[in-house]
Image (tube, rainbow, N blue to C red):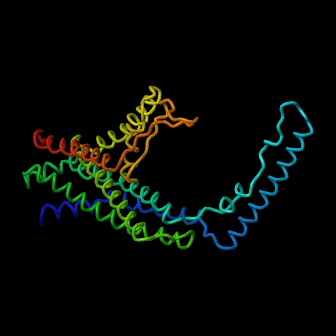
Amino acid sequence: MSLYTAETRRLTKRRFTRFFLIGVVLLLGAIAAGMFLTNHKNTPEVVAAAQAKADREFQQAVVQAEAERKACEAQAQPGNDCSQMWTPTREEFQAQWYMPPTFNFRKNFGDMVTTLAAILAMAAFVIGASFVGAEWSSGGMMNLLLWRPQRLTVLNTKLAALLAVLTAVTVLLSAVWTGVFALVANLRGTFGGMTSGAWQSILLMELRGLVIVLAAGALGFGLASIGRHTAVAMGVAIGVVVVLQAGLGTVLAMAQVKYLEMYLAPTWIAAWMNKSVELVDYNAPCVGAGGTCEQPTLTLTWGMAGVGLVAVLALVVGTAMWTLRKRDIT
């Protein structure tokens, strides 16, 4: 049996991997069920009820506004200009604002793709860290290197097996996820406007989500390999999220740093998934003529985010390879 086949079987047969993936599937199922139950299809009856409610609200607003205008005129105080008081208009009471939420596949499915990628990335990080971390803490890595003494070959094969399994799981779940929400849109929303370009955009977004999942798995794998324990990777993750990101955000806000969101990881992930993110410097003075007030903006693109992601991966995985080659195994 080849080393790659053995590592693939080792990963897929682990109870931790199986149970964790089952938990992920259950969580995704709960999200899909919640979206199904909280959205409704806009049938003619629903539209008519919303229009009737909009009409009632409009009539009540007209009566109330008229009463307030008469009260203003009755006071007859100097400086009171009752003609400038608010007068309701029909455009301010549209039926669509009184309809229950409905799932628009073209507009809303992008958020669901991001949700799927975030959950699978979290799972990939934990599974990747546990996969190699358990080998180190149990002594299995040392025994394996006695059978196959090529250190980098062993670690690279383990990483390749991990990425292959994560790719298969992500592609499968992405296909099921898309089908489930297509069904939700048909039964509890609308599926209109799905052109070939719209499908291509969704596919590319799912591919970017796959990259995020693979990157998270590789990061967990690399950190656990550097520390030779699963807890090291988990500790680094907690430190980055809780201490670095939360603490850094607070410090930057107090220091009124320009484009403070640029220093936070979620901003770069959003730029990668959504192709771009526009940041606004709210601490800068307003610029513009004619009484307008516009803060300067900065756009982060998916290309910039991709370069940053590659740099982080190269640092962590490269360090893991270097430490395995230079450090003692015992």
Name the quadrant of the C terminus.
Answer: top left
Q: 197 or 322: which is nearer to us? A: 197
- Residue at image point 36% right, 61% down: 206
- Residue at image point 17% right, 64% down: 5
What percent of the width, then of the height, locates residue 233? 29, 43
- Residue at image point 20% right, 54% down: 159
Position of 48 compared to 64: left or right? left
- Residue at image point 29% right, 40% down: 232
Figure quadrant of residue 318: top left
Q: 193 or 249: which is nearer to us? A: 193
Figure quadrant of residue 296: top left
Name the quadrant of the N terminus.
Answer: bottom left
Q: Residue furthest front?
A: 290
Position of 251 compared to 301: left or right? right
Q: 95 or 227: which is nearer to us? A: 95
Vertically, is 27 above or below 319? Answer: below
Position of 72 compared to 324: left or right? right
Vertically, is 156 above or below 225? Answer: below
